[in-house]
């Protein structure tokens, strides 16, 4: 496998402009001769499908929900970053770029991240033109708030529903193209296989989730915008349907999987309340603008929060990171919470929680101002916990939230398989080992609106066209493989449900490959996962048949992939003998308990090549070369 | 607590359905309604029985996938709450709960509690957008928008497209859904340009899908998990009238 990142030459700030000039174009009349498959209708997929349709390509777009508008992006709450510097507080493209690279603990690819910061300003213009109702000041201009890891106010938001509003904007643009006939939408259709013809990605195999029918679709290129894999941990803040299937099955067909161990744990989620829990709910990071995080200074303090006087409280983020305080980046805040809970100073019935307190902000600004800023989040908190956070502090705890790892792509967002492009959370490229808040929405839209539409044209213009028919043997073989897998799942007829396997796998990962990892734990996980997988294939029960609407079957297929993918995740975590960003190895920490990177030996992207189930994958390294920034020990003190 | 569930089961869209009874045991007040159903489904699956099919995804009340009529009321009747955010602390031990799908001609049944809401997508395709393509847009701050307009547009844009408004209406009217989109876009200068044409096209699409006419009872507003206001319907009627008059 040869990994060429194809980073354009020249100074950082000129690379994208120059590359755009150098890329070949497809003339307008020829565009309609090219078919593109876009899997996913989240921010990345919907924006890509709509833009490609506008340009005149023939697009087929797929999602597993009943409507493209329900993609998981809809759930993003807090906001989207852009280097507009509307607040005149010293922001710039370079600063956003630098914050993102530093936030990612110097494990991201410099050129991609710089381009992301550049494009951020266009995104806001685009969204406003579509009618996205971003928050405004009384003068009618756009309002901003701050997010973690930044000392400027550059986050644009629409109440606590930013993802919804951005996705609705992209969905509407998509709908416009569906009406225009350039995009054909396939909702409730799940991609289950990637088809290669002459070693190029030229199609997919899908299952119609209503009829169960398995069919093939061919195209000149395949775009995966299928989101992240946090749900391998069972409990996460992701929607229930989020899964790794599309990406993992592409990996099994030869696409390299990069940095799977870079997973993000979000510091502010509602703590787990019991076994029945089906998912965890995020309380947006934006709350840390006004909320103060604290626990008691005493261990095992059972007093109610209002009974604990000021001097006996430990505002540990403000104490440890005075210059960023409550807005320290996510990985750092999460670990700090874990630390105080490990010391026995956690709050709530389980002791796995810390307070997020708004009393001071309410005193300073009034309850109404706080309600205006975060009303829906406070309501959501109350619905779930039955507690009123205007009166008593919220209880929060870290939870799995986002995955920086994903399929390897070059600067053009193309994987190592020609014709396979990967966008949004599904790729690995822009956030290094830790993503800053409000940067995922930015990346999804940058990829879909402004990067892929150029780079895919270059791919079409510089390769010999090859439009395979779905009657070709490659498609028939892939369909056969997919049917066999489905039949295998249905024929086990064992005793354990998919949920029970998924829960066990998730717990194992959370314990051994969660907020803190070490060699012994990872080795244990790597022994236990194959055993669990074996039991899965011997003792699983899936009801119903293939030829019908069968949610149990859909879920079983996704968990079957987690059973293999979990091993890749732990293998990567074990091989990365350093701590960086969301990957914290207890063996590698500074005296103060901060992550200790090893730039000499580990400043590379780990890209894994599949060799077969039960066989160790092969590691390929893409060196990370920093032309512009100097790698430093991250400090938020 | 222990509950008795009467759940609508329907194997395929076209086969007849019927209520079946299930026991939900050891239900904890902290569970969400869907988590309670998950537990019932786990039980069924362990016994090799077909679990109850229902739609859900984000479980945070924002994706609009969940859709149950609970004791006759879409989303169960707690103000501003979608089914996935409804918690079992609102029920009591020994209670019987009826669970049905959205029922409307324009939402054909798929299986059990799952229906086909693609009619909503087709209505948006008819004009629920601003006709701008990617790129070439002016600076976001070039055009100030009064905060009151933006806030009101946001109230309408909060619609999650779940379809509860249709399920609650005795005529299965989609007026609240359609008016929310028309309100959202029409209140902003970017969307105003196409306001009347949009109203015309979307209302036509709505009628073509087989949704009924507005019954003016306000039952839609009462069940809307995002509390979309009825006043958007009168605003839409205004836009529509202007459009039919050729403005
Ligand atoms: C609760 C929450 C809050 C967040 N808040 C913020 C925030 O404030 N700011 C921020 O920047 N980021 C936030 N994020 C992160 C951000 O929302 C996501 O990273 C981003 O939306 C992912 O977009 P995407 O387009 O890559 O994928 P998704 O939105 O996950 O879309 C994936 C799409 O792929 C489809 N799909 C997947 N697999 C298949 C398959 N096999 N076949 C067919 N279709 C398939 C799905 O149907 C869906 O349409 C948040 C995340 C969560 C969980």
Image (cartoon, grey):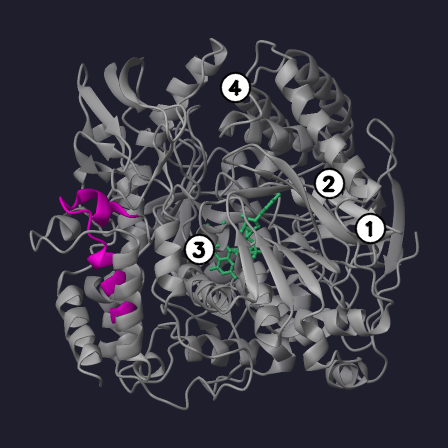
User: Given contact means CB atoms under 8 Å apart, are the residues at marks 2 and 4 in contact?
Assistant: no
Looking at the image, is mark 2 or mark 1 earlier in the sequence?
2
Rendering coords of residue A128 (x, y %): 42, 78
Most frequent secondary structure within the magenta stretch: helix
On residue A544, which mark appears? 4
- Indicate if the residue with disc 1 has its beta carbon within 8 Å of ligand 1: no
Disc 1: which residue: A606
Disc 2: which residue: A249
Chain where mark 4 sits: A
- Indicate if the residue with disc 2 has its beta carbon within 8 Å of ligand 1: yes
The CA span between labels 2 and 1 is 19 Å
Where residue A553 sits, quadrant-wise, is top right
Where residue B1 sits, quadrant-wise, is top left
Does dot 2 land on a helix, a strand or a loop? helix
Rendering coords of residue B122 (x, y %): 39, 58
The CA span between labels 4 and 1 is 40 Å
Name the residue rendered at 35%, 31% in the picture: B34
Disc 3: which residue: A69
Name the residue rendered at 77%, 37% in the picture: A476
The CA span between labels 4 and 3 is 29 Å
Chain where mark 1 sits: A
Rendering coords of residue A118 (x, y %): 63, 79
Same chain for the residues at labels 3 and 1, yes or no? yes
Of circles 4 and 3, the one toward us is 4
Same chain for the residues at labels 2 and 1, yes or no? yes
């Amino acid at each position: 496998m040869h990994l060429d990142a194809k980073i354009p030459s020249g100074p950082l700030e000129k690379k994208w402009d120059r590359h755009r000039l150098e890329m070949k174009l497809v003339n307008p009349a020829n565009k309609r001769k090219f078919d593109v498959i876009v899997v996913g209708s989240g921010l990345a997929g919907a924006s890509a499908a709509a833009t490609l349709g506008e340009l005149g390509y023939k697009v087929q777009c797929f999602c597993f929900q009943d409507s493209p508008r329900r993609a998981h992006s809809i759930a993003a709450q807090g906001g989207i970053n852009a280097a507009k510097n509307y607040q005149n507080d010293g922001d710039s493209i370079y600063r956003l770029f630098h914050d993102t690279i530093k936030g990612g603990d110097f494990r991201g690819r410099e050129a991609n991240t710089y381009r992301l910061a550049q494009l951020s300003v266009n995104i806001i213009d685009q969204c406003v033109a579509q009618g996205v109702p971003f928050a405004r000041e009384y003068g009618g201009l756009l309002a901003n708030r701050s997010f973690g890891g930044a000392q400027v106010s550059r986050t644009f938001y629409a109440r606590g529903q930013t993802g919804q509003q951005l996705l609705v904007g992209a969905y509407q643009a998509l709908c416009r193209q569906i009406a225009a006939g350039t995009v054909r939408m396939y909702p409730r259709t799940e991609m289950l296989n990637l088809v290669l013809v002459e070693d190029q990605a030229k199609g997919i195999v899908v299952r119609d989730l209503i009829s169960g029918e398995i069919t093939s679709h061919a195209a000149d290129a395949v775009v995966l915008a299928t989101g992240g894999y946090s749900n391998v941990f069972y409990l996460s803040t992701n929607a229930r349907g989020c899964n790794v299937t599309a990406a993992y099955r592409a990996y099994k067909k030869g696409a390299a999987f990069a940095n799977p161990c870079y997973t993000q744990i979000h510091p502010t989620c509602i703590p787990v309340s019991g076994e029945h829990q089906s998912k965890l709910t995020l309380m947006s990071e934006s709350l840390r603008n006004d909320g103060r995080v604290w626990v008691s200074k005493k261990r095992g303090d059972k007093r109610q929060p209002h009974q604990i006087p000021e001097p006996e409280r430990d505002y540990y983020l403000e104490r440890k990171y005075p210059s960023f305080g409550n807005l320290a980046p996510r990985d750092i805040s999460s670990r700090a919470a874990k630390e105080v809970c490990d010391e026995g100073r956690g709050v709530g019935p389980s002791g796995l929680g810390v307070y997020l307190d708004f009393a001071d902000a309410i005193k300073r600004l009034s309850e109404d101002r706080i309600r205006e800023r975060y009303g829906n989040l406070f309501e959501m908190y109350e619905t779930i916990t039955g507690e009123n956070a205007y009166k008593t502090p919220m209880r929060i705890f870290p939870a799995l939230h986002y995955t920086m790892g994903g399929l390897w792509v070059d600067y053009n967002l193309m994987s190592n398989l020609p014709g396979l492009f990967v966008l949004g959370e599904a790729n690995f490229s822009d956030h290094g080992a830790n993503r800053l808040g409000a940067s995922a929405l930015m990346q999804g839209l940058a990829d879909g609106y402004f990067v892929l539409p150029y780079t895919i044209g270059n791919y079409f213009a510089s390769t010999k066209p090859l439009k395979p028919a779905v009657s070709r043997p490659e498609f028939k073989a892939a369909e056969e493989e997919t049917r066999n897998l489905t039949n295998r799942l249905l024929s086990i007829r064992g005793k354990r449900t998919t949920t029970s396997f998924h829960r066990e796998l998730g717990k194992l990962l959370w314990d051994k490959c969660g907020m803190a990892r070490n060699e012994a734990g990872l080795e244990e996980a790597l022994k236990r996962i194959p055993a669990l997988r074996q039991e899965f294939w011997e003792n699983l029960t899936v009801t119903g048949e293939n030829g019908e609407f069968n949610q149990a079957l859909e879920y079983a297929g996704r968990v079957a992939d987690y059973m293999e993918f979990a091993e890749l995740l732990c293998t990567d975590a074990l091989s990365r003998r350093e701590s960086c960003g969301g990957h914290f190895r207890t063996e590698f920490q500074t005296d103060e308990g901060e992550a200790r990177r090893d730039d000499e030996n580990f400043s590379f992207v780990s890209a894994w090549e599949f060799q077969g189930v039960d066989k160790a994958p092969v590691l390929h390294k893409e060196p990370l070369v920093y032309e512009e920034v100097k790698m430093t020990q991250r400090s938020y003190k | 607590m222990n509950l008795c569930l009467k759940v609508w089961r329907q194997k395929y869209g076209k086969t007849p359905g019927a209520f079946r009874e299930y026991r939900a045991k050891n239900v904890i007040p902290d569970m969400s309604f869907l988590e309670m159903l998950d537990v019932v489904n786990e039980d069924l699956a362990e016994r090799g029985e077909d679990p109850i099919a229902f739609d859900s995804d984000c479980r945070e009340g924002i994706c609009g996938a969940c859709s149950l009529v609970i004791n006759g009321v879409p989303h169960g009747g707690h103000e501003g709450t979608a089914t996935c955010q409804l918690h079992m602390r609102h029920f009591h031990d020994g209670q019987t709960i009826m669970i049905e799908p959205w029922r409307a001609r324009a939402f054909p049944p798929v299986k059990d509690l799952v229906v086909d809401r693609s009619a909503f997508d087709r209505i948006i395709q008819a004009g629920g957008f601003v006709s701008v393509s990617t790129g070439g847009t002016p600076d976001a701050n070039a055009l100030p928008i009064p905060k009151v307009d933006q806030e009101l547009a946001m109230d309408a844009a909060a619609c999650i497209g779940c379809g509860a408004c249709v399920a609650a209406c005795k005529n299965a009217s989609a007026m609240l859904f359609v008016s929310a989109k028309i309100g959202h876009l029409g209140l902003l200068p970017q969307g105003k340009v196409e306001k009347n044409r949009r109203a015309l096209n979307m209302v036509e699409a709505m009628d073509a899908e087989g949704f009924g006419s507005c019954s003016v009872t306000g039952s839609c507003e009462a069940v809307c998990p995002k509390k979309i206001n009825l006043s958007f319907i009168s605003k839409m009627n205004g836009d529509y009238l202007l459009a039919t008059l050729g403005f």
